[in-house]
Image (tube, rainbow, N blue to C red):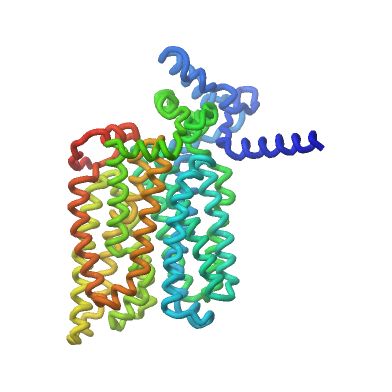
């Protein structure tokens, strides 16, 4: 019996090791035999010896990988694996977008079928950010223990279960539980995705590929708006479950991050993961050596990390992350997305509210791709400035429109103003304050504090989201729609000051260079380089 138990334990250890190992890279030798790169490229050899010996070793490996005289050879684009990894992670983000938008098209159906009051339905929307707050705090420990990839997988499995539960919900209490757990998974995923991207993608494309999760999240929002126009809320939930399936297969194609492997003293896996990400023909000697020397065995305790966050560089990074998350939410985007249909109904516009909601979703979707093109050209700060200015103008305009509506001015001929304002508002938000806080979350923290620090920042984000979502209806009842939009506009003005004084530019900088910036006490002026 003991022997059987030992065999089972050994079996599962092998399964876990196989699952967490990076995808194998095969080369073909002149005899046509397959050989793993890990058999010909020893990470210890990369570190040991002189620089010339290391580079000779790398050149020999690349030569064996690219000069196969016989057999079939397929040469991938150099960034193919990094794009594959980014798209795989972004598929999970599409599910989170679907979750965030679900309440907008499902409002009427849920209220009618389950006899849900307005107050109860506000909790259906608010339990997602509340659960995400808890998930973000728990996720900080999960990503250090299980790794980034497996933590995202855990969140994705929870998504699948929760969507099925929502689809068969027979009462509002059942819906509360399912939405709360889905929010818990959203908190885990939103914390882990930017860290995975930040630790795997090269600096010159990290901005572009780093915005893919945001872009896919907007695809999820748009898809939910479109399908919700034609489908019942239960069928819509089953569609959300289908969105969770692709990553269950893609997870087996991508590696864990090299930095996490190095922090766990798993040197060979760190080397193999880096080799897979950069390709067989790239010289990874310098990057791997820096990774090995800097990150090896970095697994401090939670208490020690919290103490280290008081250091200037770490505290500065934390303030930047918290500030960006605060302004991302308190400029009103979540309220607009969650209650888009209600906002258009309140505006008195003759334009169909469902059509207006879909148009806003389309703009939200398209604008992120514009941001992905600009972020590595214009830089992070200039897009944040553009974002703030756009939100200031549109939120003040919306507030003024609703104020005139409140005074019963004859403004029916200006019914296009709410739709136009929200289009510009969402466009501006999606260029800057939508994606960039998440992008910088994966850039500004060193790995020894990244898990806990990013966990705090993500939890704070979801706390802000909960406050805005839960209080938006109460604010409208207290000061009217015009007061709510003016408050968001004032906070958008404050965001300009924060970005100008506190936020550094991280465009085209390696993680080590960004860490050096965090250690300086001076700001980093924006310099445009086309």
**Residue 363 can be seen, yes or no:** no
At 33% from the left and 32% from the top, the residue drawn is 512
Q: Quadrant of residue 503?
A: top left
Q: Is residue 80 above or below residue 68?
A: below
Q: Nearer the viewer, residue 528 or 387?
A: 387
Image quarter where the C terminus lies is top left
Identify which residue is drawn at 35% across, 39% down.
445
Quarter location, residue 415: bottom left
Residue 64 in percent (x, y) is at: 54, 23
Taking depth in this image into account, of 57 and 69 the one nearest to the observer is: 57
Classify 511 as above or below 489: above
Q: Nearer the viewer, residue 308 or 5?
A: 308
Figure quadrant of the N terminus:
top right
Position of residue 204 relative to residue 297, above or below, is below
Which is nearer the eye, 305 or 217?
Answer: 305
Residue 255: give x, y in percent of width and height.
53, 39
Judge from the rendering whether residue 438 lies leftward or rightward of residue 61; answer left or right: left
Q: Residue at x 18, y 37 (%)?
A: 522
| Residue occupying image coordinates x 46% and y 58% | 94
- The answer to whether residue 291 shows anywhere in this view is yes
In the image, residue 212 lies at what x, y percent? 40, 50
Count of numbered labels shown in the rendering: 0
């Amino acid at each position: 019996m003991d022997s059987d138990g030992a065999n089972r334990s050994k079996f599962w250890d092998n399964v876990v090791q196989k699952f967490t190992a990076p995808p194998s890279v095969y080369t073909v030798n002149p005899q046509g035999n397959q050989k793993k790169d890990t058999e010909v490229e020893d990470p210890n050899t990369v570190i040991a010896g002189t620089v010339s010996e290391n580079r000779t070793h790398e050149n020999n490996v690349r030569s064996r990988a690219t000069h196969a005289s016989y057999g079939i050879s397929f040469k991938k684009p150099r960034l193919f694996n990094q794009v594959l990894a980014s798209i795989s992670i972004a598929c999970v983000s599409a599910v989170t977008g679907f979750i965030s938008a679900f309440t907008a098209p499902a409002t009427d159906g849920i209220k009618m079928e389950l006899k849900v009051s307005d107050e109860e339905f506000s909790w259906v929307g608010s339990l997602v950010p509340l659960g995400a707050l808890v998930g973000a705090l728990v996720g900080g420990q999960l990503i250090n223990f299980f790794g980034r990839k497996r933590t995202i997988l855990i969140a994705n499995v929870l998504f699948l279960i929760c969507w099925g539960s929502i689809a068969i919900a027979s009462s509002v209490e059942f819906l509360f539980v399912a939405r709360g757990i889905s929010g818990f998974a959203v908190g885990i995923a939103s914390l882990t995705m930017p860290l995975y991207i930040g630790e795997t993608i090269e600096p010159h494309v990290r901005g572009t590929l780093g915005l893919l999760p945001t872009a896919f999240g907007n695809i999820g929002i748009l898809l939910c708006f479109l399908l919700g126009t034609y489908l019942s809320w239960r069928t819509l939930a089953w569609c959300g479950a289908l969105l969770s399936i692709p990553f269950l297969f893609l997870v087996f194609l991508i590696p864990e991050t090299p930095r996490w492997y190095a922090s766990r003293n798993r040197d060979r896996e760190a080397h193999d993961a880096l080799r897979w990400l950069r390709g067989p023909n790239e010289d990874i000697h310098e990057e791997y050596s820096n990774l090995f020397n800097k990150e090896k065995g970095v697994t401090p305790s939670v208490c020690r990390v919290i103490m280290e966050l008081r250091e200037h560089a770490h505290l500065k990074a934390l303030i930047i992350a918290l500030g960006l998350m605060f302004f991302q939410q308190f400029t009103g985007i979540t309220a607009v997305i969650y209650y888009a249909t209600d906002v258009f109904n309140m505006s008195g516009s003759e334009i169909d509210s469902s059509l207006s909601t879909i148009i806003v979703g389309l703009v939200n979707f398209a604008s992120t791709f514009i941001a992905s093109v600009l972020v590595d050209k214009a830089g992070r700060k200039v897009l944040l400035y553009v974002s703030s200015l756009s939100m200031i103008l549109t939120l003040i305009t919306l507030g003024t429109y609703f104020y005139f509506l409140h005074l019963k001015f004859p403004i029916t001929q200006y019914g296009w103003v709410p739709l136009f304002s929200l289009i510009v508002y969402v466009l501006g938000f999606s260029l800057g304050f939508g994606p960039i806080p998440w992008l910088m979350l994966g850039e500004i923290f060193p790995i020894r504090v990244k898990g806990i620090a990013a966990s705090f920042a993500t939890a704070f984000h979801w706390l802000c989201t909960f406050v805005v979502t839960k209080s938006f209806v109460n604010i409208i009842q207290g000061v009217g729609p015009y007061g709510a939009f003016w408050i968001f506009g004032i906070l958008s003005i404050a965001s300009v000051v924060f970005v100008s004084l506190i936020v550094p530019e991280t465009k085209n900088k390696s993680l080590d260079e960004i860490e050096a910036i965090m250690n300086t006490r001076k700001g980093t002026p924006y310099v445009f380089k086309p």
